[in-house]
Image (cartoon, rainbow, N blue to C red):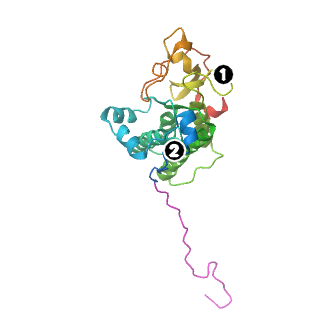
Amino acid sequence: MSKEEISLFDDQKFETDHKKFELKAIGDDSHLIKSKDRVQHHGEVFTPKWMVEKMLSEPAIQEKLHDLHATFFEPSAGEGAFLKGILHQKLSYVDQISNKITWKNNALWALMSIYAIELLQDNLIKAKRAMIDVFINHYQTFMQKALSSNTDLYKSARYIIDVNIVQGNTLTFKNSENKLIEFREWIPSGNKVKQNTFTYKSLFNNDDMDDVNANEGQLSLFDDFENGDSKQNQPVQLTKVYEV
């Protein structure tokens, strides 16, 4: 090369830094109560991480956690200790059985299978945030790229969390607007999904719901939902459910 010639890159080697995403452990919020006042007025006591892990380690529960469509219901979600534990284990199973083409749909089916009610709005916000954080963490670790909030996958995940994890009182069957608590039933239709709206109250086979007491009016955390009567929507792609 003559002195007048200039090398395009001046003989330097350029390397691109790739951020490596790693699966994060589920955090432990450590506190069991926020205040004595909340305990007295709402009976609010949070479940420690070790207890969540112990309950989810039961063989019968592990079998359900390895079933994308097996439903889980938390009648008092708190800040989402059980919700993020369940979602983390379900998505760990999704990671095992999926490739980069099938992961999105499998992950959304797993997310659709988790339901919860929480009375207090501040807890509800934290529970929803915890779930989307777990979802994002698994996606980024599996795909090794960031999940943009502008993508259909992110928008659908947020939508599913919003309609499956709701504010309300499990004993009165109503939310803070004095309306019956509603959920979505997600029905497979080929490689698409249909949505049915149903009420929490419709899950109970009791004609006089006003007389249901605390023990009779609370579903088990691991009970499967039964179908409720509601208007069906047209089948849509799983990553487009937020457009309905």
Give coordinates of residue 44: x percent, y percent: 52, 37
Residue depicted at 44% across the width and 39% down the height: 86
Question: In the rendered image of this protein, does residue 54 appear above or below residue 170?
Answer: below
For this view, does 143 lie left or right of residue 126? left
* Magenta span dominant secondary structure: loop
Question: In the rendered image of this protein, does residue 108 appear above or below residue 216?
Answer: below
Residue depicted at 66% across the width and 32% down the height: 243
Disc 2 marks a residue whose amino acid type is Ile
Q: Is residue 120 visible?
A: yes
In the picture as drawn, the residue positioned furthest to the top comes out as: 207
Q: Secondary structure at mark 1?
A: loop
User: Can you tell which mark lies on residue 179?
Assistant: 1
The magenta stretch is: 1-22
Residue beneath label 2, please? Answer: 33
How far apart are the alpha carbons under marks 2 and 1?
29 Å
Question: In the rendered image of this protein, does residue 180 appear above or below residue 94?
Answer: above
**Depth order, front residue of 216/149:** 216
